[in-house]
Image (tube, grey):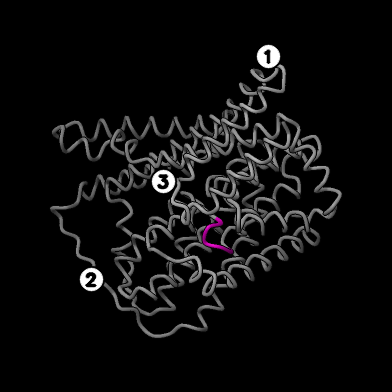
């Protein structure tokens, strides 16, 4: 039983990691892997025990999925009202260095408010409007991946793995923001400084022309829903602190408020016009394959945990790599090859809160390493995979042009975090 579950899990990992080479959607693989792992486990354990374990795990998984669903719907709703086009109108420089710093700064900040995947999608779309030359645009996008992943790490809603740790009670919102802001910033700034020394000149810009007949929302509605939408996302940690309810409740509450507001504001519109700017429209545009991917992979990891495999792996890992720093850094490097979501899910299952309580050094460093380590290879993060698909960036190009920059930023941020902890106690 144990051997078969491990083989199924490893096969699923392989197919997910090489999704773009074998042309099999990773959501399908994740769902099959998750269910099959539980099927194998079901044939070798007490049925009543399995029912209790599965129910417990599914309750925790549902909280993560509903949180992501709400967040994605809000972002799609803002986009439906052209809220993100605001940035395209404000950026006027053509200088490569200036534009690169602006784009990376925006990516770093936006990913902390939204999430790294959404930010990457928004910034790639923005760069298509701003930079005409393909090679220049790919270089900018490579830095967007690094900046978005770094920016998402220090925010409880910026990266799925940090969100998982926050929802699971491994880290608190305030502490993760305080302790990881500087290391995350360094992991972006060092690559940015290096690449700034290599580029010069002007980018060939594409003119931004906004045709008022194509804008789905009036200027007032555009800004109203942008402010309210981003405000809802930012207020989720506050909601959790006040009510002590799970974060997904705050996200769903915010989605409901936004939905009610849109119904009131848009009630004078005809049905056709209302349909393309409603929350229902945003829900239809949510990336459901990503939601199902997380469901499948989290189910698979839950099966490993329930069967006792993660406890065995934890013991082995502790024996081979007893030092917490080395262990976290190693896990971060692995996340460049294997998606960081299952890695963090496995770590949560391997290390109970009795061993490492909330805001323990290990959880914070794990959040940093798995979040920024995924930038080292383009397939190591959702942000990288999204950019790869949108701009047709090859694995080899990214490895040649961006991977070393991401690697030095990763180790620089890790060193800063370790020094910060030992000298400042943060």
- In the image, 320 versus 210, the foreground residue is 320
Q: Which residues are magenta?
A: 376-380
Can you give x and y, in whole percent of width and height, for residue 400 in the image?
Answer: 53, 74
Q: What secondary structure is the magenta-colored segment mainly?
A: helix
User: Helix or strand or loop: what does disc 3 sit on?
Assistant: helix
Neighbours of disc 1 within 10 Å: few (<14), some (14-19), many (20+): few
Q: CA distance from mark 2 to mark 1?
A: 64 Å
**Residue placed at 40% from the left, 57% from the top?**
389
Locate the N terminus and report the quarter of the image it occupies.
top right
Circle 1 residue = 48
Can you give x and y, in whole percent of width and height, for residue 8 in the image?
Answer: 62, 39
Q: CA distance from mark 3 to mark 1?
A: 44 Å
Circle 2 residue = 207
Q: Is 139 one of the magenta-colored residues?
A: no
**Residue placed at 48% from the left, 50% from the top?**
115
User: Helix or strand or loop: what does disc 1 sit on?
Assistant: helix
Q: Which circle's residue, 2 or 1, is located before the other in the chain?
A: 1
Q: CA distance from mark 2 to mark 3?
A: 28 Å
**Residue placed at 66% from the left, 23% from the top?**
42
Q: Which circle's residue, 3 or 1, is located before the other in the chain?
A: 1
Residue 274 is left or right of residue 234, and the answer is left
Q: Which circle's residue, 2 or 3, is located before the other in the chain?
A: 2
Circle 3 residue = 230
Indicate whether 30 appears above or below 397: above
**Residue sticking out furthest to the top:** 48
Can you give x and y, in whole percent of width and height, for residue 332 in the image?
Answer: 67, 56
- In the image, 426 versus 355, the foreground residue is 355
């Amino acid at each position: 039983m144990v051997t078969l579950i491990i083989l199924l899990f490893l096969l699923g990992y392989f197919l997910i990691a090489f999704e773009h080479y074998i042309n099999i959607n990773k959501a399908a693989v994740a769902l099959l892997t998750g269910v099959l792992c539980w099927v194998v486990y079901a044939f070798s354990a007490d049925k009543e025990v399995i029912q209790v374990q599965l129910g417990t795990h599914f309750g925790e998984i549902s909280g993560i999925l509903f949180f992501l669903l709400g967040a994605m719907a809000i972002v799609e709703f803002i986009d439906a009202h052209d809220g993100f086009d605001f940035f395209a109108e404000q950026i006027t420089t053509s200088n490569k260095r200036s534009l690169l710093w602006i784009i990376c700064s925006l990516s770093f900040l936006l990913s902390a408010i939204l999430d790294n995947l959404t930010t990457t999608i928004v910034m790639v779309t923005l760069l298509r409007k701003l930079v005409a030359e393909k090679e220049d645009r790919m270089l900018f996008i490579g830095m967007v991946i690094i900046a978005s992943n770094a920016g998402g790490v220090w925010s409880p809603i910026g990266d799925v793995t940090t969100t998982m740790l926050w929802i699971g009670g491994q880290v608190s919102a305030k502490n993760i923001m305080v302790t990881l802001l500087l290391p995350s910033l360094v992991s972006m700034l060092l690559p940015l400084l290096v690449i700034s020394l290599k580029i010069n000149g002007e980018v060939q810009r594409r003119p931004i022309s906004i045709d008022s007949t194509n804008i789905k929302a009036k200027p007032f509605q555009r800004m109203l829903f942008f402010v309210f939408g981003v405000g809802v996302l930012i207020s989720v940690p506050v909601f959790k602190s006040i009510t002590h309810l799970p974060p997904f409740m705050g996200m769903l509450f915010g989605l409901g408020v936004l939905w009610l507001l849109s119904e009131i504001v848009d009630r004078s519109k005809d049905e056709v016009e209302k349909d393309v700017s409603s929350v229902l429209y945003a829900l239809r545009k949510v990336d459901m394959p990503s939601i199902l991917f997380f469901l499948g992979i989290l189910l698979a990891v839950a099966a490993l945990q329930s069967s006792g495999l993660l406890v065995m792996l934890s013991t082995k890992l502790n024996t081979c790599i007893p030092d917490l720093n080395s262990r976290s850094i190693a896990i971060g490097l692995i996340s460049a090859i294997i998606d960081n979501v299952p890695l963090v899910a496995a770590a949560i299952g391997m290390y109970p809160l009795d061993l490492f309580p909330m805001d323990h050094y290990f959880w914070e460093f794990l959040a940093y390493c798995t979040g920024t380590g995924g930038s080292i290879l383009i397939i190591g993060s959702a942000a990288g995979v999204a950019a790869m698909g949108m701009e047709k960036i090859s694995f080899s190009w990214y490895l040649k042009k961006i991977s070393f920059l991401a690697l030095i930023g990763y180790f620089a941020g890790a060193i800063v975090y370790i020094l910060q902890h030992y000298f400042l106690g943060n």
